Amino acid sequence: MAVVMFLLHLEVPLPFAYNLRIEEEYHFPGKELEIQTYSYVLLHKNEAVVIRADPSPHHPLDYRKRKLVAFPHHLHDEKGRIRSFTGRIEDFLKEVEKVLAERAQGRMRR
């Protein structure tokens, strides 16, 4: 049985000059669609990475030298630190919401 592959590349403009980039590669080995790999990135207007998540297996430990909870899934936070991450896009979107909320709060104080 042949494995069918699908690719998704999506870029969505967000408030405060941010862009959300979602890249996923899917395999369809039978009746179930599976995410083979992904990259979720929040970029600022100058293409600077704010946060990103991926399943590359090169980071077994977080920035505190603890094992990642769902290795190889991990998140690079706004300070460049490696943190545990579930691998679920819903959880990445929650992180994006936090960044946007913090930016909105900072803007309201000015």
Image: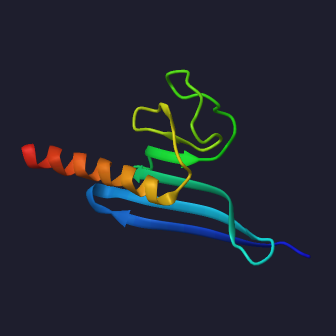
Q: Quadrant of the N terminus?
A: bottom right
Residue beneath the point at 31% across and 48% down: 99
Residue 66 in the image: above or below residue 98: above
Q: Position of residue 61 (x, y in %)?
A: 60, 28
Q: Position of residue 21 (x, y in %)?
A: 49, 60
Q: Quadrant of residue 66?
A: top right
Residue 92 in the image: above or below residue 79: below
Q: Position of residue 4 (x, y in %)?
A: 80, 75
Residue 89 shown left or right of residue 50 in the figure: right
Residue beneath the point at 75% across and 78% down: 31
Residue beneath the point at 24% across and 51% down: 101
Which colour assignment does the render follow?
A: rainbow
Q: Quadrant of residue 14?
A: bottom left
One can see residue 95 in this view: yes
Total numbered circles = 0
One can see residue 45 in this view: no
Name, please, the residue furthest toward the top.
65
Residue 24 shown left or right of residue 86 in the figure: right
Q: As rendered, which of 54 and 61 lies closer to the eye?
A: 61
Q: Quadrant of the C terminus?
A: top left
Residue 32 shown left or right of residue 81 in the figure: right
Residue 56 shown left or right of residue 15 in the figure: right
Q: As rendered, which of 93 and 45 lies closer to the eye?
A: 93
Residue beneath the point at 16% across and 47% down: 105
Q: Position of residue 43 (x, y in %)?
A: 42, 51
